[in-house]
Each structure stands twice: as structure tokens, then as C-alpha cells.
Image (cartoon, rainbow, N blue to C red):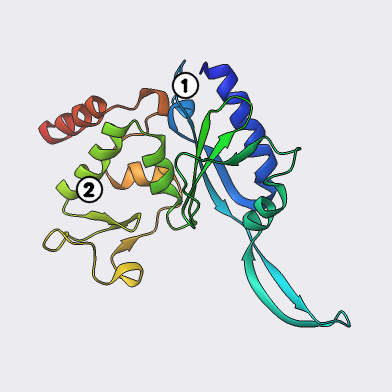
Amino acid sequence: MKRVAALSIAQNLVEEISPACDRIQIAGSLRREKSEVKDIEIVAIPAMGETHVIDMFGNTLESKPCSTLDTLFDFYLGQDVFAWEKDKDLKRWGPRYRRLSHIETGICCDLFLTDELRWAYQLTIRTGPARFSKAIVTLALRRGWHFSECQLHLHPKVKGKPCARGKVCSFIKPLSTEEELFNELKLPWCEPAERSEDWLWEIERNRVTL
């Protein structure tokens, strides 16, 4: 699909679901400003709210945390006013990844759900391109670090396995933006449209030879 058409569809979806998100951004080939795109990718942090269990007299018996994005989708899906449906070919509807299909055009949207701790990694990786994203992971390993559960651990990967301490590891580097992730990996900022595996390794070669 041409970029201008896909971008309009993506922006409309962002506008519809952004009230249920703390943070949301278009990623993938649209963010890299490609003239033709195969699908839409969006990274979002769902906002949290509460659902109430009420008795027959209207008294609140219990309050439970819930994702307002789930509430929004429960309300919108299947209604004529909503332009999207769950993808019927690739049925993915989990807590971290959901796939939607645009009813009119058929273009799909990969919706990646994350949180503040993992935002920088997810936005960088989901923006791509794929070989650049893989190079980011490899570069961290070359630094003697690694990514585990979408967070940067400033210690080596033990026997090829993720960090045993997980999210409570004391060597996790907090990263809230892409700029912080690039800086930590000793990379200059690079606009999405300019990102490539060749650019990354050229920067690394120049850094090593200085």
C-alpha cells in the first residue's frame, strides 16, 4: 500500500485508541518513511483503570485493575463505527501483541503492547529495519551486555540464557527513550529513515579505530 494511504489509516487508529494509552507511536516502515508498506506497526503503553463489581443495590463490592485499552476494544470490536477487526488469518490477541485487520482495505496492524521500562527497546526494535534491530542486539553483546525481557542488562549473558534475576536484576539500565538507548550503546542519534545495519557497523568501526 502507498505510504500516504497507510499513514492515514494508521493515524486514524492511533487517534481512536490513544485515549486508552499512556503512550503510543507508529513504528515500522511507516516511521522509516518508506513509500510502500506491507503493514502497520504501532507500539503502545496501555493506560490502567479500574473495573467495579457492583451488587444489586449499586454498592461496589470489589474494584479490580484493568487495562482501559481492553475495555475500549471490548466496546469497539464488532461495531460498525470501528474500522478494524481481529485478524482472521493470524489469530494473535495476547497481553503483548495483537493483530488487527482493516476491514475496508485488508491492511494489517501489528499492535505491540509494552510498559515504560520496555518502551525504548520496543520502539527501537519495532521501528527496524529487521537487520538493524538484530544488529542492536548484537552490539549489546559485543559491549559485554545483553537484552533480556526487552531491558538492557549491563552484564554478560550467562551460557546464552536470559538473566536469571529477570526484572529484579540490579544491573538493568533504565531507558525511557530511544535517545537514551542509542547513547548507552555509544551510538549517535539516527533518524528512523536513515537506520540500517551498514550504518550501525560503520559507526562502530569508526569508533574502534579512533
Q: Toward the viewer: 90 or 97?
A: 90
Q: Which residue is mark 1?
A: 33
Instruction: Please rate how many residues cluster around mark 2, counting C-alpha atoms within 10 Å: few if below 14, some from 14 to 19, many from 20.
Output: many
Query: In the figure, 106 relative to 181: above or below?
Result: above
Query: In the figure, 189 relative to 91: above or below?
Result: above
At 19% from the left edge and 34% from the top edge, which residue is drawn? 204
Q: Along the horizontal axis of the image, is 143 left or right of 54?
A: left
Q: Measure how far apart labels 1 and 2 are at the Cα level.
A: 26 Å
On residue 140, which mark appears?
2
Instruction: Please rate how many residues cluster around mark 1, counting C-alpha atoms within 10 Å: few if below 14, some from 14 to 19, many from 20.
Output: some
Q: Toward the viewer: 188 or 141?
A: 141
Q: Quadrant of residue 18?
A: top right
Local SS, label 2: helix
Q: Are marks 1 and 2 in contact (CB under 8 Å)?
A: no
Q: Amino acid at mark 1?
A: Glu
At 46% from the left edge and 54% from the top edge, which residue is drawn? 96
Q: Position of residue 17 (x, y in %)?
A: 66, 45
Q: Quadrant of residue 9?
A: top right
Image quarter (top left, top right, bottom left or bottom right) of the C terminus: top left
Q: Along the horizontal axis of the image, is 75 left or right of 191?
A: right
Q: Along the horizontal axis of the image, is 189 left or right of 94?
A: left
Local SS, label 1: loop
At 65% from the left edge and 75% from the top edge, which residue is drawn? 64
Q: Position of residue 29 (x, y in %)?
A: 43, 27
